[in-house]
Structure formats: structure tokens, C-alpha cells
Image: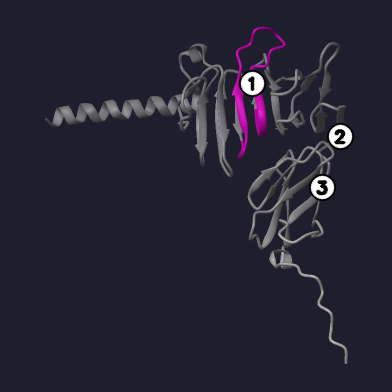
Amino acid sequence: MKTRILSLSLIGLALVLVVVTIAIRGNPMGYRGHQAVIQEVVGVSELRIEGARPERPKPGQLIGYEHELRTSTYSSVALGAPAGTLTIFDSSSLRTRKKQGPADPAWQLVSGRIRVDVDGQRGMTLGQQVSDVYLEMLPGAFFLNADGKGLLAGTVLDGTLLLHEAKGRPTEIKPGQFFVLSPLSPVVVNDGVPPLELTAELAPRTKAGELPTVNGRVTPGGRVYINGELHYPDTSGEFVAALHPGSQEAVILAEDIAGNAVRKVLPVGRWNEPTSPPQPQPAR
């Protein structure tokens, strides 16, 4: 009996070591046609597989083609791939794609913010959901941000990024440079991430029963949380968001592509009190 218990314990330990090894070093069988392996899961996330119900991702789980990972607020998922690693930050969505040709990206950033570390000499390709533009990331480290509507921003920490648009030579983004791309404007490249700036105010109240509304602007390429909810500014950095009924304040957190953050709190004050026309004063 003791021998049997010892054998089962050793088998269980061996299985745990296999899972840990796969999570840290990747699939020892060379992924066998899979795109990546999950290394770490923090918070609440879900894995969507085409034609199947969403499931909770787990370390050691292999990711195939046409899979989608979604992270909720204050959550993240780290993936190991043959060419490097990808870290998906909170409130983001990333899909895997099967390459049919050199211009077909292997990854598709639907929305949100990710970090990509490339160590494979062939690099890694990533595209958007609403654009035929794709990024070719050579060995190095990169931050990327997309709003799901065509806005794509990024910065190169190390290495070189090639931004491919239609035909012609790609735009080369070098270490320390920052770029913003939108469907209605050409690529804008700056030397360094612009300082993170945030302006926000409550819109004037115009009628009774109106919900408090925050108007503001953040450095283009960033994103904004208002009372914990994610909002994407437009290509110029402007945003408008209505608060929930009964909100006593608007807590605004702006975050740039590199993860720098700035916070501002606006008291709602008398917004929730009914308005009434001024009453005439009795004559004396």
C-alpha cells in the first residue's frame, strides 16, 4: 500500500514538473503547430476558441490558431512563443492568426496594451483588427497600444520595428522612438514618448436629470479609466464619458503607451440635485 502511494506521489510530482517546465521554457516538442504556451495568468481572463465556449486560461496551456485571449481590469497574461514572449495587460484582447504569406501577421491586437519581447532571429509579426497595416518586430522589446477602431501606437525599447503600409518601403521605428497611426492620418513618429498630459472637467449641466459628463484630453496614443471603466480617446486624445447615476466623483486615470500614469479626481458636487427655476422674492 505504501509503495502504491509513493508511486502515485512520484507520478504527480513528475506531472507538476512537466507543467512548470512547459510554462517556463515552452513546449519541449517545439509547439507542434501551436502558436504559444501560457506562462502566467494574473487576475481574471478568458480564452476564446473558435466554435467553443470561453474558458479560463491556465499556465502550461497551449494556444493554437484563431484563439483569442481577453483580460479584464487589473489582469494580465504572459505567453511564451517560439520567437519570444508577449505580455497582455488589463482590458486587452489578442488573437492568434495562421500565416498564409509573409505579409500575414501571426498575432492580431484587437484592443488594449501589450509588451512584446522578441528573441528569435526571424522576428514576430502583429496586425490590427481594422487595418491591413502590420508590424514586423525584429529582436528587441516593444510596447503597443490599440483602441480597436484603427488607432495604433507604440514605442521601441530595444531593437527595430518595421511598420508596413500597403506597398513601398516600411517605416522604420528605432529604439526610443514613439509612433501613432490612425486610419485618417499618416504615421506620426516622435523621438521619445511624449510627456503624459491630462485635462478633464465636468460638462456644464443643461437640464434636470442629465447624467454628469466628463470631457477631457490625454496625450494621443494613451487610454483613460474613468471610475474604473476603460475609455479610448480619439486620434487627437479627446474623450467624453457619462458617469453612472449617483456617482459622487469622477476618478480619472490616464495611462500612456509605456505604462506611465497620471490621476485626477473631479467632485460631482450638486449634479445629482434636481434643478428648479429661481423663485420670485416677495416684495417688501
Q: Which residues are magenta?
A: 89-116
Spot occupied by residue 223 in the image (x, y as percentages of width and height): 73, 42
- Tell whether position 101 is magenta: yes
What distance separates the C-alpha of mark 3 from that of mark 1?
A: 30 Å
Q: Residue 107 shows which numbered tag?
A: 1
Q: Amino acid at mark 2?
A: Asp
The residue shown at (47%, 22%) is 52
> Which one is in front, 25 or 131?
131
Of the numbered discs 2 and 1, the one sitting upstream in the chain is 1
Counting residues from the start of the chain, the first of labels 2 and 3 encountered is 2
Percent position of residue 48, x then y: 52, 26
Q: Nearer the viewer, residue 76 or 47?
A: 47
* Residue where numbered disc 2 is placed: 191
Which mark identifies residue 122?
A: none
Q: Amino acid at mark 1?
A: Trp
Mark 2 burial class by Cα count in 10 Å: few <14, some 14-19, many 20+: few
In the picture of the structure, the residue carrying the numbered disc 3 is: 217
Q: Tell me whether the residue at label 3 lies in contact with that at label 1, contact meaning CB atoms closer than 8 angstroms.
A: no
Rounded to the nearest whole Å, what is the CA distance between mark 2 and mark 1?
26 Å
* Residue 284 magenta: no
Instruction: Say if mark 2 contacts mark 1, CB within 8 Å.
Output: no
